[in-house]
Image (cartoon, rainbow, N blue to C red):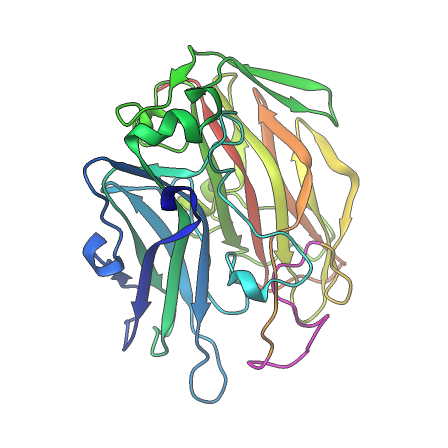
Amino acid sequence: MEHYEMRLLADYIHTGVQAADTWAKPSPRDVGSELEKNEVAEVVFAEVVQSPVSGGGEEALKKIIPVLDGQKYGEYVSLSGTLSSVMAPRRRSIWGAKLFSFGAPHSNDPTKSTTLKYTEHVTLECLAGTGGITGDYRIRLWGYVYKEDELPVAFPGGTMMFPAPIIEHPRGRRLMLVKEPIPVTGKTWNTLPGGKDQSIPKINPFVRYAFNKLATDGKSGDYQFRYTTGNVDESDENMYFDFDTLNALVIEGLGIRADLAGHLAKTGLLIAGDYHPKGLIPTDYDDNPLHFGQTYPFIFNTLPENPFFYTIPRLERYMVWGEKGMVVVRDDGTAVAANDLIVALTGIRVEMKG
């Protein structure tokens, strides 16, 4: 029964020049993702491979956004594809860490079944950053395709189980996601978590990154990756969340690439006025437990020969719900220059209105 096998769902190979600040927008046919009428699919993980250019340099594959059945998902999923800071590296090249996935396949738990779901096709939009792109890059999406009549067997009990709790252990909080259980069928597929036609509460995977658009203060104060204050370049880089009780972000992973000059000191979360973890996490250039992307400077400190990557480290689960929460960093008393840090955040986005 081949429909229970992990398979390649989409494969995009870009060759030639892509000018700075332009988008590559392959069609579903270009990436080979079109489904048959009686099929549905879920994307479990992505792989991004960028070839170094002549001389060994990297180029800015600034942003990768999935498009499900014609709908862009950049509000929830925005990936860096640049070689050094790639957020979804090739599976075989991951060094000592678990692959980042959008969710768990064929799960009936709504808090785990956040895979990207579609019924017709999936594709990508890819943005070239400063300097443009001349080298090749490749993006692959992996997951499962099901015949509609297989769904009751593929998903335990044939039902997405609601109500469902989300528990945050560090602060002893519990959010109950309330709706009627949803039969898993072809007709309901896009209404399941990770689908584009959900009723409230909407549950989606969440992964994004940001650069520090401004320099840090040089006084070991908090730098917030906040769009409304101009601290990040675009709204889908925002890592400042001011939520009422009808919005929540469940934070599951946090990564940062420190500045080469070595002035980043600490990284962490500020939620409802309290720092988490307490004291924040020391993240200097030479000893950074939140490092992601290429493994240098810790392993194989050469470029572009370094073939290994770290995925975004996992944290204890924290929840921003009915409060303010944000990612913060601090320098060591000397300012970190603008755009010398890149931070990545993963989790689950919950919307109980709209």
Image coordinates of residue 20 in percent, x first then y, are 31, 69
**In the rendered image, the vertical position of residue 167 relative to residue 314, given as above or below:** above
Image coordinates of residue 204 in percent, x first then y, are 44, 33
**In the rendered image, the vertical position of residue 174 relative to residue 221, given as above or below:** above
Q: Quadrant of the N terminus?
A: top left
**In the rendered image, the vertical position of residue 236 relative to residue 258, given as above or below:** above
Q: Residue at x 73, y 36 (%)?
A: 276
Task: Tell whether position 293 is magenta.
Answer: yes
**Is residue 223 something that shows in the picture?**
no
Image coordinates of residue 287 in percent, x first then y, are 78, 62
Q: Residue furthest bottom?
A: 55
Q: Residue furthest right?
A: 279
Q: Residue at x 43, y 31 (%)?
A: 154
Which secondary structure type mostly characterizes the magenta part of the structure?
A: loop
**Is residue 287 something that shows in the picture?**
yes
Q: Nearer the viewer, residue 277 or 161?
A: 161
Image coordinates of residue 81 in percent, x first then y, are 45, 62
Q: Residue at x 63, y 55 (%)?
A: 256
Q: Count the marks: how many?
A: 0
Task: Tell whether position 159 is magenta.
Answer: no
Which stretch is magenta?
290-305
Q: Quadrant of the C terminus?
A: top left
Q: Residue at x 60, y 32 (%)?
A: 325
Q: Nearer the viewer, residue 145 or 293?
A: 145
Q: Nearer the viewer, residue 269 or 330?
A: 269
